[in-house]
Image: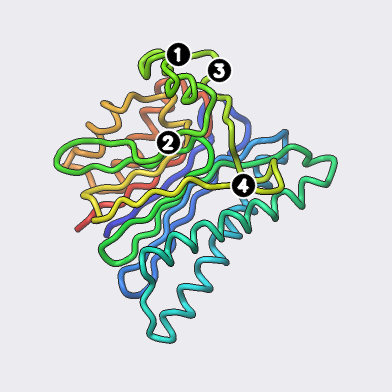
Amino acid sequence: MRIFGKSDTGVRRPVNQDRFLIREFPDGLCLCAVFDGMGGANGGEEASSAALHSFDECITCEIMDRVCRGEEITRYEAEKLLCTAAQTANAEIYRRSEDPALEGMGTTVVAALIVHDDVVALNVGDSRLYEVSRGALKQVSKDNSYVQYLVDIGRITKEEAVNHPKKNLITKCLGTEEQVEPDVYRIGEVPDKLILCSDGLTNALSEEAIFETVNDDRLAPGEKVKALIDAANKAGGPDNVTVILAEND
């Protein structure tokens, strides 16, 4: 796969509390993850950075140990590994939040682990994973948010959710509770494209605009990611924005 990621502070925020991780391993294994931190002047950066480190260390050590022993990682093991990484990150952030200056900090995470011909994904919060297959964009992850809850119970429509005043209120993240239960998704066959992003992108651009950009074959993956971030900033850049694009060769 060809993979490119980029993060930008945006127009209105003084610091970037987003982080992203791309780690490629032997045998075609690959980890991609986006973290969107929150919690005061320093808390968001601290939470997203701690989560990134935990994910990287937990998953990289296990995969490289398996590779060295000549053992393959199954889809079930990949799912278990992602959950362990999320729970480890949650525990670390929760521990650090005992510092009064960091109280209440947390971070979202959306991650995809590509294992041979399968993709296993995990989500906590409202950062998103999309796939592009057969000429269509599909949201894979489901937001852990109050607005998504309203959509689920039929109180509002998906279209009404776009401009809802409480659209940024999330119901789950890493670090604010002692335990966390991630949402896990099995995509199965590796799609044409995978997009992982923070809500700085999806709050600024429509899904139609995102699809048009990533489907522009005149652009390389890095150019597509830059074009998405530039478009989000042109639309007001209200938040930090992070995008990872993985294209299947």
**Which mark sits nearer the N-terminus, 1 or 2?**
2
**Which mark sits nearer the N-terminus, 4 or 2?**
2
In this picture, residue 155 sits left or right of residue 194: right
Mark 2: which amino acid?
Lys
> In the rendered image, which residue does mark 3 sit on?
166
- Provide residue 184's location: percent of width, then percent of height: 44, 49
Picture quadrant where residue 207 is located:
top left
Mark 4: which amino acid?
Val
**Which mark sits nearer the N-terminus, 3 or 4?**
3
In this picture, residue 114 sits left or right of residue 184: left
> In the rendered image, which residue does mark 1 sit on?
155
Q: Of 64 and 87, which appears nearest the observer?
A: 87
In this picture, residue 37 sits left or right of residue 129: right
Q: CA distance from mark 1 to mark 2?
A: 17 Å
Q: Residues within 10 Å of mark 3 (few under 14, many from 20)?
A: few
Residue at image position (52%, 45%) is 109
Badge 4 element: loop
Mark 1: which amino acid?
Arg
> In the rendered image, which residue does mark 4 sit on?
180
Mark 3: which amino acid?
Lys
**Which mark sits nearer the N-terminus, 2 or 3?**
2
Q: Is residue 32 above or below residue 70?
A: above
Q: Is residue 29 above or below residue 198?
A: below
Q: CA distance from mark 2 to mark 3?
A: 17 Å
Q: Residues within 10 Å of mark 2 (few under 14, many from 20)?
A: some
